[in-house]
Amino acid sequence: MQKLRNLSLAVIIFFLLLSLYKHRDSWLGRIGEELPGLPARTVTLHSVSPDPAILRGSGPVSYAAAVRQAAPAVVNIYTTEEIHLHPVTPDLFFQRFFGTLPTLTQKRQGLGSGVLVSADGYILTNNHVIAGADSIVVALSDGRETQAKVVGADPDTDIAVLKITLDHVPVARLRLGPPLQVGDVVLAIGNPFGFSQSVTQGIVSALGRQGLGINTFEDFIQTDAAINPGNSGGALIDALGNVIGINSAIYSRSGGNMGIGFAIPIALAKDVMAQIIAHGRVVRGWLGIGLAMQNGLGARVIPQPVIIDAMVQGGPADQAGILPGDRILTIAGEKVQDSEQAIHKIAVLTPGTLVPMDLQRNGHMISVRVRVMERPQEQVVPAAVDNP
C-alpha cells in the first residue's frame, strides 16, 4: 500500500513539473512584473557582426588599402662605389726591383630606398644612401629599373634628391596636415636587407626628437615600426597611405631594429627638396657661432640657456662684437629657449640681411645687429645613431 502511495505522489509531482514547464513564459513574465528587482523574461544580447568592409581588408584590422596606395611609389635604390687602393711598401728593395705596385680597385655595393614624389621622376631619399656612389640604380615596384642622377643633397638634414626618366611613374601622396599625434598608427615601407616592398607596422612614439647627433638640423618622428638596414630613404606612411616621413635612422646596439626608429618629417623633406631643385643646394643663414649643446635626447620642455661657446674668426657674429660666453636671449625679436631652437631660427634667416639679437653678458643685456651670411656647405658625420 505504501509503495502505491509513493508511486501516486511521484506521478502527481511529475505532472505538476510538466505543467510548470509548459507555462514557464507566463509565470516568469508575471514574476518579473511583480518583482522589479528581478530580470524580465526577455534578455537582449548585443552581438557584433564584422563589417563587410573589414572582411575585405579595408578596415581597422587591415592596412592593405594604405599599402596599395603608397607602396608603388616606394623604390629600391642600389648603389655602387669604386674604391681605389694604393698599396705602399716602405721597403725600397721591392720598389727598386718591382717598381710602383698597381692600384687595386674594389666595388662596394649599397642599398636603400626612396620615394617618388612627382610625375617628373623626382625621388626623395637619404644623403647617406647615395653619398660617394659612382652608380645609382632605381628599381620600381612594377619591375622597371633605370639609372638615376643626383639632383642635389643636403647633409645637414640627410636629404638627397634623385631624378629618373621614365613614363607613368607612380607618385606618393604627401601629408602636410593635419599634424601627427603620438599614438597614431604608422607603416614603414622599404627595402630592408634587400627584401623589397617590405611593410612593418607601429605607432608614432614621439615627435620633435632633437639632440640625437645625427644631423645638424633635427626634428625627427620617432616610431617603433621596424626599420632595418636598407629602409633608409623609404616611406613612413599613415593608416590612409599618406607619406608622413622619410625613414632615416635607428637607435641600435646590435645594428638591427630595437623598436626605436627615426624619420624626417615630410614637410621638412619637401622644403629641402624644393630648394635643391631650385638652387642645387639649400640656402641657410649663418652667424659663425657654435652653441653649447645640452645632454639628453628629445625636445625639451624646460628652457635651457643658449650659450655661445665658439666663434669663427672674421665671421658675422665676430664682426658684430659678439663674444664667447654670451647668452642669446632673442634672434630677430623672437625668444629662444634652447640651442636646437636657436640653430633652426638662424638657419631660416635670409643671407645679407641685418638681424637684431639680444644677448646677456656678465649679467647685463646688450643688443647687437648681425649681417647674416650663407651657411657653408659641410659634411655631417653621424654619431649616436645608426643609419639603416
Image (cartoon, helix red, strand yellow):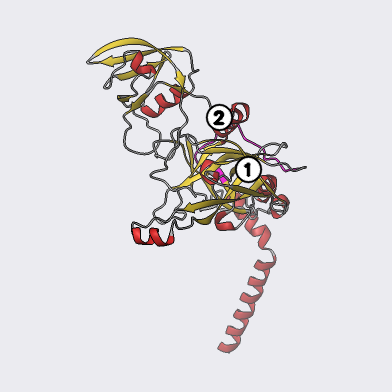
**Residue contact between numbered discs 1 and 2, judged by CB atoms under 8 Å:** no
Judging depth in this view, the residue of 324 and 135 nearest the camera is: 135
Q: Is residue 287 visible?
A: yes
Q: Amino acid at mark 2?
A: Arg
In the image as oriented, which residue stretches furthest toward the front? 97
The residue identified by callout 2 is 281
Residue range highlighted in magenta: 169-186
Nearer-N-terminus badge (1/2):
1
Label annotation for residue 194? none
Residue 49, quarter of picture: bottom right
Q: Looking at this rendering, what residue extends furthest in the right direction?
A: 167
Residues under labels 1 and 2: Cα distance?
Answer: 19 Å
Q: Which residue is mark 1?
A: 115
| Residue 139 place in picture, x, y as percent | 67, 51
Within the magenta stretch, is there residue 88?
no
The kind of secondary structure element at disc 1 is strand
| Above or below: residue 357 compared with residue 160 | above
Q: Nearer the viewer, mark 1 or mark 2?
A: 2
Characterize the local packing of mark 2: few (<14), some (14-19) or many (20 or more) Cα atoms within 10 angstroms.
some
Q: Is residue 226 something that shows in the picture?
A: no
The secondary structure making up most of the magenta span is loop
Task: Residue at 43% x, 40% y: name it.
Answer: 214
Is disc 2 placed on a helix, strand or loop? loop
Question: How far from the left and from the top, in percent, is residue 210?
Answer: 42, 35
The image shows residue 111, relative to residue 126, as above or below, that is below
Amino acid type at mark 1: Val
Task: Determine whether, in the image, residue 359 is placed left or right of residue 66.
Answer: left
- The magenta stretch spans residue 179: yes
